[in-house]
Amino acid sequence: MSITRIGLGAWAMGGNGWAVGWGPQDDADSVGAIRLAVDRGINWIDTAAVYGLGHSEEIVRRALAQMAPSERPYVFTKCGLTWSDAQPQATPRRTGAPASIRREVEDSLRRLGVERIDLYQMHWPAGDGTSLDGYWETLLALKREGKVGAVGLSNHNLAQLQDAEALGHVDSLQPPFSAIQRSTAADLIPWCEAHGTGVIVYSPMQSGLLSGGFSEARAASLPADDWRSRHAEFRAPALQRNLALAQAFRPVAERHGATVAAAAVAWTLAWQGVTGAIVGARNAAQVDALLGAAELELDDEDMARIADAIERTGAGQGPSRPSGDQSALPEDLFS
């Protein structure tokens, strides 16, 4: 697949009523956001079965049904998080059992209304006792059978990536990555660059903290059914450091005539080895604000300014700036 530099994330489109929702969401707004993103050239959507306990995938289907087959974007989804309809607010279970994954792929195909999923990803390492071999071999089999076009891992560490690659190629990795959450740049991104594994990062705006529109008042007003209201990055003292870093993006954005949100996303795309970034949007207006990230390229001066701000504010953790040609790193670094 040849994908655009940014793709549309559909996590928030799952709405509320489950353990990791973003609060109330209007389905018509969600469909409108997908339609506009595709109309403006974005050619992939990332969702997951667990988002809204199947609802996000159903919303993607509604949007796809309004498009001609030739206009439809690639659809990426995930497996490995299961739930009980009787207890929707319970924390989803990390399930890797092969029989479960086969049920999950059939459920996702039905909800999405597609004959094949373009990229199928294991959402998290299994927590039910299933070995990595057990679930990765199942995903590889689904690829051979044609039910999915490519297979990847999300939220896995370097050792797990290496173990999976020994069984069959990891087509893609989906890790968290932003100017706040930077640990991925220390090992995972360079490993993927060296091994031909695509990287599509999620939360490049750190779930809104680096959007340029977030504030302490906004954090305090998050509803109880928005997972961010319970997360440490949205509370003191991390919140103040994160907002100070967001402000440091403003002159960089203004220099390029872009939004702070676009600059924050472009920062992740400036790292060698990053293939694309997932940008979440809840309505068409938010899509418009983010489209500029696809064309925005930060230069060395921009990256140095942001690195200085990272070090000055103390926000997050991980490398603050790219260091040389990571594709030339020795193989034994990853062994």
Image (spheres, helix red, strand yellow):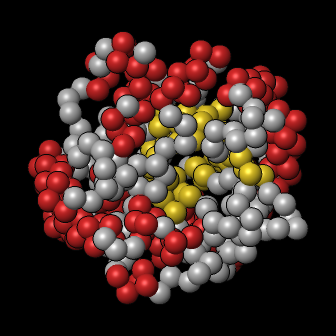
**Which corner quadrant holds the N terminus?**
top right
Q: Position of residue 120 (x, y in %)?
A: 68, 39
Q: Residue at x 51, y 75 (%)?
A: 229
Side of 159 relative to 308 (left or right) = right
Among the 4 quarters of the image, the one containing residue 135:
top right
Q: Position of residue 28 (x, y in %)?
A: 68, 78
Q: In this view of the protein, which residue sits in the foreground, 13 or 225?
A: 225
Q: Position of residue 238 (x, y in %)?
A: 32, 67
Up-down relation of residue 172 to residue 94 (above or below)? above
Up-down relation of residue 18 to residue 183 (above or below)? below
Q: In this view of the protein, which residue sits in the foreground, 137 or 55?
A: 137
Residue 229 seen by the camera: yes
Side of 17 relative to 269 (left or right) = right
Side of 15 relative to 217 (left or right) = right
Q: In this view of the protein, which residue sits in the foreground, 198 or 96?
A: 96
Q: Residue at x 23, y 46 (%)?
A: 320
Among the 4 quarters of the image, the one containing residue 243:
bottom left
Q: Residue at x 65, y 16 (%)?
A: 167
Up-down relation of residue 248 to residue 322 (above or below)? below
Q: Residue at x 74, y 51 (%)?
A: 93
Count of number-bearing discs: 0
Up-down relation of residue 35 to residue 299 (above or below)? below
**Which corner quadrant holds the C terminus?**
top left
Q: In this view of the protein, which residue sits in the foreground, 118 or 321?
A: 321
Residue 116 seen by the camera: no
Q: Position of residue 222 (x, y in %)?
A: 50, 82
